[in-house]
Amino acid sequence: MKFLAILFFLPLSIFGQAYTAGDETLKRMNEMPISYEEMEKLASLPLECVGKEYPNKLNQVLREASDLKSPKELHPIFYGCFDWHSACHGYWLLAKGMNAFPKSKLEKEVVALLNANLTADNVMKELEYFKPKLNQSFERTYGWAWLLKLHAELSNSKLNKKHKWTEKLQPLTDHIVKGYLEFLPKLVYPIRVGEHTNTAFGLTLAYEYATTVKDQELKEMIEKRAREFYLKDINCPISYEPSGFDFISPCLQEAHLMSKILTPTEFEKWMQQFMPFIFQEDFTLEPGKVLDRTDGKLVHLDGLNFSRAWGLYGIAKKVSKNKEQIQKVADQHIEASKEYVVGSDYMGSHWLASFMVYAVFEQE
């Protein structure tokens, strides 16, 4: 069921006032799981924050006093939206909106922003930050994953050939891919937390990148490690979730990754052992609750609702049983937090829109 399509779409006569397109574009628009108006509202958040330098959480390891520089000096592209990884996925959301709605006002704004900021010189300065030994694990693997996801989305753009965005970004992308290939063989145990270092999340977006750009070496590495990490897992204790600061569900994110790695037959068999309760007709899962959305940690639970939703949508696409109930629970999670993205406190607004958009497009 296209819950969000029903929720968000406006009549074309109204929609056309804000968005002018030919018949083919309008046909494609009708196939989008989100309306242009809603995408424009969500995109307004990263459009505003990718150039907002402060407040800023650098997560910087200092080698010496000369390392103390402003966020924009250190990261001339990804300095906004509070931290490096949020800037990365803010740009991803914008690229997603640009690709979903060609010839729109949003597309023009995103193209101008990318051309101004995503320059070869800026990319090389971003890359320079990763070179010192103490910085080589910077943003591993959460920010790494979003950088690769951005690259993949830009590669899908019909405008990429003209503007050469991925060509400019390639040196930094290559460095991140190299980081994955060197790090994954050394990771003895997966990291199963509900925050940034969750291994399944980092592998999911990297796998989507590898599939999109046909990076066979990275793709095979992720498949190998995912099977080694997770294939023998059983009875994931989702009743222990969520922890107070989670924005990722350890159980559902693992399932989301394996839904991409395994064949439908393999996946359904694995899910019968890993999350057997999800096949029960009365399967339910209470959305996370947030009591203070000005608290940067507590507001994580809004993000958890969106990440749970994308995990559930991914599962529903790959199983033959209980699809509608699984999708219904996913819809409930988006419903629980969707009103708290646009207009929310900056502790949430600098990142939540990306999570919502990723969840919405996982319905497809």
Image (spheres, rainbow, N blue to C red):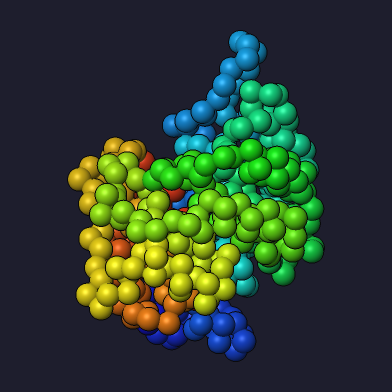
Q: Residue at x 59, y 40 (%)?
A: 187
- Residue 236, by quadrant, is bottom left
Task: Measuring from the top left, give residue 59's x and y in whole percent.
Answer: 51, 28
Considering depth in this image, is 238 or 152 the residue closer to the camera? 238
Q: Residue at x 61, y 68 (%)?
A: 99
Task: Measuring from the top left, give residue 294's x and y in whole percent.
Answer: 28, 40
Considering depth in this image, is 341 or 186 the residue closer to the camera? 186
Task: Measuring from the top left, give residue 268's x and y in whole percent.
Answer: 45, 74
Vertically, is 209 above or below 143? below
Vertically, is 179 above or below 6? above
Vertically, is 93 above or below 137? below
Q: Residue at x 63, y 11 (%)?
A: 64
Q: Residue at x 79, y 63 (%)?
A: 162
Considering depth in this image, is 27 or 67 the residue closer to the camera? 67
Residue 238 in the figure: left or right of residue 314: left
Task: Measuring from the top left, give residue 31's x and y in whole percent.
Answer: 51, 82
Q: Outermost residue, top direction?
A: 65
- Residue 277, by quadrant, is bottom left
Instruction: Classify the position of the N terminus by image quarter.
Output: bottom left
Is residue 34 among the parts visible in the rendering?
no
Residue 349 in the figure: left or right of residue 109: left
Residue 173 in the figure: left or right of residue 350: right
Is residue 178 among the parts visible in the rendering?
yes
Count up the numbered dots: 0
